Image (cartoon, coloured by chain):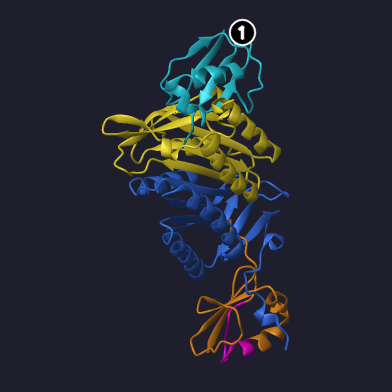
Chain colours: A yellow, B cyan, C blue, D orange
């Protein structure tokens, strides 16, 4: 339930497909989070690199956490370029009751930001510039840099 | 041989080197001006599992990946 | 941006319409919460009464709170009967940044549950039975019951 | 005349009564067996504004609403 697409996401179709897929699963709450590219600092869009093997492991660990509470998580992300006002990210939690879903969507999205192996670049003046100022070192980073 | 991959924005080709642990890799990479600046804030994975310590043995065919700071979404 | 419908909500259409409406508003985060009728206790569905004048005031106060943080809220709710696995409630927050949206959707949905003048009934064995055990007295209730 | 409305599950027709404050309404409703049980957990609105105290004057044409416990969603 991790879906990667080249370019912008078709948000309405994804939200509909996920809703329809779980229509008879008896979940009471469905909370998608949709991330859209904002116009700021003169960018024309964003671009993404993804390292899939580790993303899949990270996602599977979250799916296990969700399952333990009777919930499920779905996620979609773009690879490559996504232009202004297009969307690059959707995460969604389904759960029987609302509290679990409200808590999971928050924790999942925050951990996604801090841990998912995805790199963001600004598209600006024809260049693809690593968004280093908005990026977060993954927990445990730096072990190779420690001088003896 | 151990394969070392540099992910995302780190502009460096993969390496194939003869090492048996991460300590040796640290020594080698700290000498490399191109990537020395990335070492402090990059995470390390061995065969696609993140590791938190250099105390990891490596064998022939292993893959080590460097993951610089991330920003999905 | 408060929409009331007779019967079940067309979730995919509403989620799409809201996304399209704000496509150029430069919001970075869109978080809908969708509430769906679960099969439990042998019910065939739920039914709702709404008192609109107070619902509108309550909603407008939340809209003001959202606006103060650069966000907006949209909400849809069903009147009357909604059957199993159909949806009766959607609330959504749009905001420039994710933290505001994640916090607002949680606070909004919880206050909605505690304060919005909507009454729920179980549809069971051909009857419409007030869901008193799941209902919450609005803050400040009881003043007419105090004996002198 | 003040109009008193009972919302949601309270099965009672609206009343039109001559009162000038909520204290008087409390006295009247506490005598009414049909709705006495709802008084403890119902909220009160005057002209569609929720009130937290009985210290509210009423005038001709005002509307008082009783809102029993809610459960939207």
Task: Say whether residue D24 is magenta.
Answer: yes
Q: Residue A70: percent from the left, percent from the top?
A: 68, 40
In the figure, residue C127 lies in which quadrant? bottom right
Q: Chain of mark 1?
A: B
Q: Residue A41: percent from the left, percent from the top?
A: 32, 43
Q: Residue A13: percent from the left, percent from the top?
A: 44, 36
Q: Residue furthest left?
A: A125
Task: Say whether residue C85 is magenta.
Answer: no
Which sits in the foreground, C1 or A71?
A: A71
In the picture, the quarter occupied by the C terminus of chain A is top right
Q: Is residue A26 above or below residue C60?
A: above
In the figure, residue A31 lies in which quadrant? top right
Q: Which residue is mark 1?
A: B60
Q: Residue at x 37, y 45 (%)?
A: C20
Q: Residue at x 35, y 31 (%)?
A: A129
Q: Residue C34: percent from the left, percent from the top?
A: 54, 48
User: Can see residue C80?
Assistant: no
Magenta-drawn segment: D13-25
Q: Residue at x 67, y 84 (%)?
A: D29
User: Can see residue C135?
Assistant: yes
């Amino acid at each position: 339930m991790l879906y990667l697409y080249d370019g912008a996401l078709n948000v309405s179709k994804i939200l509909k497909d996920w809703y329809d897929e779980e229509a008879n699963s008896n979940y009471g709450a469905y909370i998608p989070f949709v991330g859209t590219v904002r116009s700021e600092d003169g960018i024309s869009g964003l671009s993404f690199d993804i390292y899939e093997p580790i993303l899949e492991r990270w996602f599977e660990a979250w799916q296990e956490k969700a399952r333990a509470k009777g919930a499920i998580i779905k996620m979609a992300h773009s690879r490559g370029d996504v232009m202004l006002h297009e969307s690059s990210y959707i995460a969604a939690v389904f759960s029987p009751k609302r509290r679990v879903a409200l808590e999971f969507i928050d924790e999942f999205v925050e951990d996604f930001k801090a841990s998912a192996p995805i790199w963001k670049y600004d598209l600006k003046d024809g260049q693809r510039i690593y968004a280093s100022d908005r990026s977060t070192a993954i927990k445990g980073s730096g072990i190779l840099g420690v001088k003896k | 041989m151990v394969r070392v991959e540099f992910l995302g924005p780190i502009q460096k080709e993969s390496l194939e080197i003869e090492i048996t642990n991460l300590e040796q890799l640290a020594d080698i990479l700290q000498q490399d001006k191109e990537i020395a600046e990335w070492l402090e804030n990059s995470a390390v994975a061995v065969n696609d599992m993140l590791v938190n310590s250099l105390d990891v043995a490596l064998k022939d065919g292993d893959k080590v990946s460097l993951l610089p700071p991330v920003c999905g979404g």
